[in-house]
Image (spheres, grey):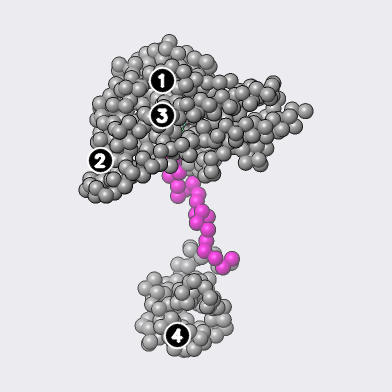
Amino acid sequence: MVKYATTLELAAISLERSSTVPLYLQLYQQLRRDILSGQITAGKRLPSTRDLAIHLEVSRNTVSAAFDLLLAEGYIEGKVGSGTYVAQILAERMDCTFDRKNNRDRPKDSRLSSKNLSKQAQQMLAIKDVALRYRQEPPRAFCLSVPALDAFPIDVWSKLTTKHWRSQQADLFCYGDPCGYRPLREQIAQHLKMTRAIQCEAEQVIIVSGSQQALYLATSLLIDPGDAVWMEDPGYLGARSVFLGAGANLVPVPVDEQGLNVEVGIGKNLHAKLVYVTPSHQFPLGASMSLTRRLSLLQWASQSGAWILEDDYDSEYRYKGQPLTALQGLDRRGNVIYMGTFSKVLFPALRLGYLVVPSELVEIFAAARATIDRHSPMLEQAVLADFIAEGHLTRHIRKMRMLYAERQEALVSSARSLGELISVRPCDTGMHLVGWLQEGICDRVVCRLLARQEITTRPLSSYYLKPPARGGLVLGYTAIDCDRIRKAVEELEIILKKIAV
Ligand SMILES: Cc1ncc(COP(=O)(O)O)c(C=O)c1O
């Protein structure tokens, strides 16, 4: 005997006539829910479209459209008009997708367990807090790595963008070279030769979506799980998360006013496969690596065959004298892989950066890039190539140097009034400063209290692999104007005075 779904079983269906969701879709969703939850069991015959339309006071077309969808997705079987049944197969298979007890879809991550995840996914789970630390928030005092967005030459950028949209240049709308848009690679090679004494040809320049992808590519191609990697301590969390995600054995190497201490690194692990350095402006402490250290690092790398990953993230902003030459410019053996980004000189959402790799690695990097996401968006690359070629980049950097020098001065001079509580020393390079806190003040606590006042800082201690003796704050000063910097320092003073007593 055929069992019909009773009016009681259909009683839970309630259609919201004022909703923006069409009635047929509401009906489909509710029938699907009731079938999955077992409210209407497998094998039950649904009422005819006519009866159901009368029961729900909707048109027959509405019911037919809902049934058609359920039929197409396999929730019901049979022909509309000659009897429609809840599919049999569902009774056996439903449990894996639907939590009947709580009458809802099973949460997706309830499946996560070490047995169905790759080793790399398990590493990612372990480091997710470091990897996901970037928050999306508007520019505030003292957020890091955010340039003065209000001073960006948006008119020029939009003119160039419009020009390229209008040109309908076919190569900007098709698949491109995984190494990047050729004119952009040429402009970058030229720019790096002039400003950073980098030795390279355009062929060695690979466009990436920011330094983060450069780190990921280099790490996946150059190290295996368990390989030793020297990491500046304190050092950049973006790099740390990539190395940990790849299962590297991180070797913390201390930094001082001459940068990474190569001797200590050699003493700790002579055979490291890779070293990550920020020689022009150590992140976060700010030292530039001395020539002696640069030469001994290159010597060790050429003897041991280690790779040096040089992250030159903000050296365009040098406030006194000429920008320092890059480590890559001194390398005669092809051990250095150089990376740079447009996140700081233009804006981080652009997601464009570059690698300069030894010639013999170009194809390997290109193949790896092509397998990840083929290449970066072509239109932005073309706009950027023109932006550099027409001199806008150089002009913008020159302007920003003046602006950031003023903002740094505003931070340093206003922080002087805080006396012993925090010591903020000026720096010739970059976009942030370190404020060393009076001994005994916990940097994490200060950051939490500042966050309540909508002030973003990062505790210096979070960048260390080995806990430091003294805490500090890493203070970005480029994103906001001098007045806001001074006001934020006043807030900081109030908080520090409260904590210090
Ligand atoms: C040391 C360092 N390298 C690189 C970057 C830039 O990363 P991306 O190019 O992925 O935006 C940053 C920005 O926070 C940084 O602090």
455 left or right of 282?
Answer: right
Q: Is residue 329 visible?
A: yes
Image coordinates for residue 323, horizontal then vertical, percent: 41, 20
- Mark identifier at residue 59: 4
Read off the residue under disc 3: 397
207 left or right of 475?
Answer: left
Image coordinates for residue 346, horizontal then vertical, percent: 41, 36
Give, as a three-letter code, the residue at label 4.
Answer: Ser
Read off the residue under disc 1: 323
Q: Are marks 4 and 1 in contact (CB under 8 Å)?
A: no
Q: CA distance from mark 4 to mark 3?
A: 65 Å
Whichever of callouts 2 and 1 sits on the residue coming sooner in the sequence is: 2
Whichever of callouts 4 and 3 sits on the residue coming sooner in the sequence is: 4
Looking at the rendering, the quadrant in which ligand 1 lies is: top left
Using the image, determine if residue 219 lies above or below residue 51.
above
Residue under the image location 29 percent in, 32 percent down: 389
Q: Nearer the viewer, residue 295 or 16?
A: 16
Give, as a three-letter code, the residue at label 3.
Answer: Ile
Image coordinates for residue 257, horizontal then vertical, percent: 52, 15
Whichever of callouts 4 and 2 sits on the residue coming sooner in the sequence is: 4
Question: Which residue appears farthest toward the top when viewing the image?
Answer: 292
Image coordinates for residue 297, horizontal then vertical, percent: 41, 16
Give, as a three-letter code, the residue at label 1.
Answer: Pro
Whichever of callouts 1 and 3 sits on the residue coming sooner in the sequence is: 1
Q: Nearer the viewer, residue 308 or 407?
A: 407
Read off the residue under disc 2: 177
Q: Are marks 4 and 3 in contact (CB under 8 Å)?
A: no
The magenta segment? 102-121
Tell us which disc is closer to us: 4 or 1: 1
Q: CA distance from mark 2 to mark 1?
A: 31 Å
Residue under the image location 49 percent in, 29 percent down: 403
